[in-house]
Each structure stands twice: as C-alpha cells, then as structure tokens.
Image (tube, rainbow, N blue to C red):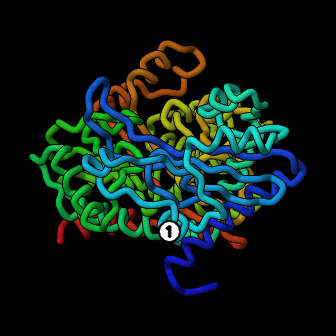
Amino acid sequence: MSTDPDKKISEMYSGHRQNLMSLFREFPSDVIFLKGGSVAHRYDTDFEYPFRQESNFLYLTGIEEPDMAALFDCKSGEYRLIIPRRDAQFAVWMGYVRSADEYAVMYGPDHIMYNDEVPDWLKKRQPGTVHCLPDAEGDIRQLGLKSDTGHLKDALAYCRAIKSEGEIDCLRRSAAVANQAHLDLMHTVFPGMYEYELKAVFDRHTTQSGHLHDPYSGIFASGPGSAILHYTGKNRMLQDGELFLVDAGTEYRGYASDITRTYPVNGSFTPIQAELYDIVLEAQNTALNQIRPGQKMEDIHLSAARIIIEGLRDAGIVTGETEELMEKNVFALFFPHGLGHLMGLDTHDVGGYPKGTEKIDRPGLRFLRARRTMEPGMVLTIEPGLYFIPALLEPAFADDKYSPHLNQKKLKELFGFGGIRIEDNVLVRDDGIENMTNVPKSRKEIEHVMNR
C-alpha cells in the first residue's frame, strides 16, 4: 500500500465500500441509497451548529461536507456521489462552490450526479429494492419504489464493528491527543478552580491539535457530581479534599477517543479515597487482562464486578460471601452501568448487539452497551466504576434482599463521596490487547504528576 497519507485514507474508504458491497452480492437487481448529514440549526433561528457528517456516510465516503448522498449499485459495485446544486447566493454566504469535476478529483467516485437527477436515474434503473436507512425511506417510497431499511443498517453495523487498519490509525491519533489533554488537566487542577475552567483546559489542547469536534459531551464532575453517571454541570467549584472525575475525548477524522480518570483535587488521596480507588483500578486491570478473542463482554463485566464487591467487603462497606453478593446483584448498587462499549465513528459505536442478541435482564448487566464475543479488530472501552448513589442505596436499605449486606452507617457517611471511574480505550488483538490510553492511573503516578 502507498505511504502517501491522502492515498492511504482514500484506500481506507474504498475498502469500506468493498466490504459493504460484498454483503449485497445476492441482490444484483438492488441499489443502496445513503444520505449524508445536513446542517442543524438551534430551534427557530439561523444559528448553525458545527456540522459533523453522519457516521455511516463518513465511513463509506470520507466526505465531511453537508447535503451529500450516495448510490451504490449492488451488481456492479459502482459508487455514485450525489452533490447538491449550489447557486451564486450560496457562494455569497457560505463560500466557494465546487464543480462536479472538482468533487470527482477530491473523492474519486465512479460517477457524479446532482441531487435533482436522482429520481430520473432511479426510475430508469428500476431497482428491485432500494436499501436505505429510515431517514430516506419516505423519499424512496414517494418515487414508487420498494425500500428496505433493515438489511443496510445491519450490514453497516457488521462492517463497522471490526476496524480496518486505517481506522485503527485514526483511533490511535484521537487517543494520543486525548491522552495529552487529560495529562494537562492533571497538571492544572487545584482547589478553587471551577469545572468549566478545567473543561477549557481540555478543549484548548484538543483544539490546538486541530481536533474540532467533541465525540460526546464531556463530564467534568467534582465531589458529589462524580456519582452522576452522565453529569452535565460545569459550574461547581472544586473543593479541597474531594475527587474530580473527567470523562472526555476528542475526534480525529470522525474517530472517537473516550477516556476517564478520577483523582484528588489537591493531588493527594485520602485513606478512604485510596482504598476505594485501588478497588476500581484492580477491577479494570482484571478486565483488561481477560480481553482476548473468544471472551464474552458479559463474563468480563462480571469478573470486574466481583473484584469491586470483594473490595467493598474487605473495606467493611458490605458483608457476606462473594457468591451470595454476586447472586443477589449487590454489586449493581455500586457499579450500575456496563463495563464498556465499542468505539469508532461514534463513541457508543454500532455493533454492540449483533442481530438476534438480546439484552440480559439482570441488574448491572441490563445496561451493557455491548454484548459481544471479542474478535480481533474490535476497539472498545473498559470502564469499571464505583459510586455511592443515594437514589440507589436508600431504597436498598429498606429492601430485605439487600439490607443485611449493607453497612448503613459507613454508606451514609459516603453519600457525599461521589464516584470513581477509570476508562481506557483498547484494541483487541489476536493475542490480547493494545491499550491506546497512557494517562497515568496508578495512585503513585497520579500523585507524582500532580505534585511535581
């Protein structure tokens, strides 16, 4: 393969198209129609949100401009890029209007079409079925053509779940920038700062690196807020003696990183913070060491949960035999979310539940975002957590199933503690994993970085 970066990227998208089309060979009379994204506005105003391409369209084309679409012929495999007709007014307000020839050179489709030419082309082609996603189904049916939305969605999820080498390189680049942004935060944080100031530190580094999109709304949670799984506040002042949880990443060419670290605001763990932090770190290391092809996500999750519940028992926070505590799902009171999720063009990437796979109706497992058997080429997060959430624990105090196992006195003292989560981004290899995350996470490393 060529070492020219632009050519390698072009070959990556070409490979993605070939993978998808290989799943439609049995439908030679059919075509695939895929719409790209459009600019979104804030309510009824002309304020434009920053444009980010629809992920499936980006996966197949690499095009980051709005108002595009594509047609793929299931028999020939030909790729038709559909571009909008832009007039002079567009150029006045939005900038230069590229010609069809320029788009052909930039993106290398087999053919270029304008969007107003699509209806006539489809009517002339008379496909047996037009495979599309739900957002385009109405457009297809208005043309009097048969549409199908299920097969394309499943096929895209299947393809995207296993990353190509080009995608892996993009994910590494995304992780590298997020790693450094997290490290900058560790160097910066101190009591008296506000959560929004630390978000600005993170954003400054990612933006200076040319990464302009957030893959999700980052969490910058201090004190009790760190026990809120999707904390959205940014206005609290960090207090001496409490923890700070940062769950944030960035995007490179649309590919996400998603890293979480938790550390003391003043740079030194208290004894209880240290004890509980080490439980979560051991749970994560246990999970990371188990990841290899053939392992199931739910089994790894339960291994991490076992470490957490045993650590809480050793700390005198819960009581009982390990098997009983696991059987009664006591662990889910403290670790209520899933161990991790697939990652790629979306932070919670597609393919976590292959077709026909059901969710597990069990506390602590029903929120798993991925129920997969590990395969080489998967990229996923591993993010065990330990939280003291009054909304979960107070009802448990009154529940005969849970109450005999809970040290209510100690737990009530921890209601303002918050939570701890440690999250790495890993690539499944034939013989284990490649961990793309190198942000310090042992207590010794964290305290060294924060106090030098």
Compare residues 268 and 40 and report the one nearer the observer: 40
Kindly indicate the quadrant of the structure image that contains residue 206: bottom left
> Would you say residue 100 is visible in this rendering?
yes
> Would you say residue 381 is visible in this rendering?
no
Q: Which residue is mark 1?
A: 106
Residue 443 percent coordinates (x, y): 34, 62
Task: Write the residue at 65% across / 67% down.
Answer: 14
Residue 260 percent coordinates (x, y): 40, 53
Give the residue type that dot 1 points to.
Answer: Met
Q: Is residue 202 above or below residue 399?
A: below
Kindly indicate the quadrant of the structure image that contains residue 125: top right
The quadrant of the image that shows the C terminus is bottom left
Q: Is residue 274 left or right of residue 34?
A: left
Residue 289 percent coordinates (x, y): 62, 64
Q: Is residue 279 left or right of residue 244?
A: right
**Mark 1 closeness class: few <14, some 14–19, many ≥20 residues within 10 Å:** few
For numbered disc 1, what is the local secondary structure?
A: helix
Task: Write the residue at 18% across / 44% down.
Answer: 196
Compare residues 122 and 141 and report the one nearer the observer: 122
Q: Is residue 354 left or right of residue 382?
A: right
Residue 30 percent coordinates (x, y): 82, 45
Q: Is residue 95 above or below residue 439?
A: above
The quadrant of the image that shows the N terminus is bottom right
Compare residues 206 and 17 and report the one nearer the observer: 17
Q: Is residue 352 left or right of residue 268?
A: right
Task: Write the residue at 19% across / 46% down.
Answer: 241
Residue at the extreme right: 26
Q: Is residue 61 above or below residue 46?
A: below
